Amino acid sequence: GRLSGREGDHEALHNPSEEAERAELKEDPRDFALWKAHKEGEDTVWESPWGPGRPGWHIECSAMAEKFLGPVFEIHGGGIDLIFPHHENELAQSRGAGSEFARMWMHNGLLELTGEKMSKSLGNIVSLREAVQEWGREAILLFFMNSAWRKPIDFSDEVMAQASAQAETFRNYFVGLDSEPGEIDRDALARVLDDDFNTPEALALFHDWRARGQTASLRWGLDLFGLGDLAQAVEAPDGLVALAERRQEARASRDFDEADRLPK
């Protein structure tokens, strides 16, 4: 349980294959096989010093990692549902073979639809292509930024509409604005991202920069997260340009109430 922190509570360690493992008369249902003996009717089989069979499903990842990344590498990622048993067993077998394996493990929360994990087996998936066609690339990126990466994130029309509105808010800010030189507040964003890559706080910082008219910082920050298209200056009707100039003047004089009052 070095990775998952789980110990001998068999009920807490239950997984879908436990009953099958019990049927194989293992001493402990958590035990796993490095090499699976060939069973009649199976098409996939190789000869080995231990008889015909196939690798256990955990070992393929350890083998690929060592071949392409070496015996030790920096970061191993995956969904939080893979911590046990898959990643726990990857680590155990790699350490047993003398490899340090991954130095850092990062497990992300799952994408959910109405409270259930999106999966092909449940038939409740929304493809990335479909989402981009419906909402646009920038809205998808902002949707993910709005949630902490370790937490589950629920996909719905409502939250996507909110993300789309945020995209338009940023895009409208830059309408009629020229690219202006200015000091970039890199330290502020670094402090936020040093806190466990806190993207919701980074997004809040971007909105603060927008409200304060820190255009250079905002353009740089959006571009850093692949949202540079939102910061493209475009020509606007004269009335809209005048409105943008009034907002800029209000921000420059620190009259943020007036800046927020003006239509965006």
Image (cartoon, grey):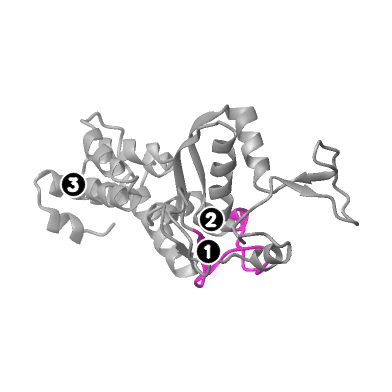
Residue drawn where x is 33% and y is 53% of the image: 200
Which label's residue is closer to the chain start, 1 or 3?
1
Element at badge 2?
A: helix
Q: x and y percent of residue 174 in the render?
A: 33, 44
Residue drawn where x is 55% and y is 48% of the image: 87
Q: Amino acid at mark 1?
A: Leu
Which residue is under mark 1? Answer: 13
Quadrant including the C terminus: bottom left
Relative side of 106 to 174, left or right:
right
Q: Give the farthest residue toward the right.
A: 41
Q: Amino acid at mark 3?
A: Arg
Element at badge 1?
A: loop
Which mark is nearer the camera, 1 or 3? 1
In the image, the segment drawn in magenta is 110-130
Q: x and y percent of residue 65 in the render?
A: 60, 34
Question: Real-space Cα distance between discs 2 and 3?
Answer: 46 Å
Q: x and y percent of residue 156 in the render?
A: 49, 68
Element at badge 3?
A: helix
Q: Which mark is residue 242?
A: none
Q: Is residue 190 magenta?
A: no
Residue in front for this viewpoint, 195 or 264: 195
Which residue is under mark 3? Answer: 212
Residue drawn where x is 45% and y is 61% of the image: 153
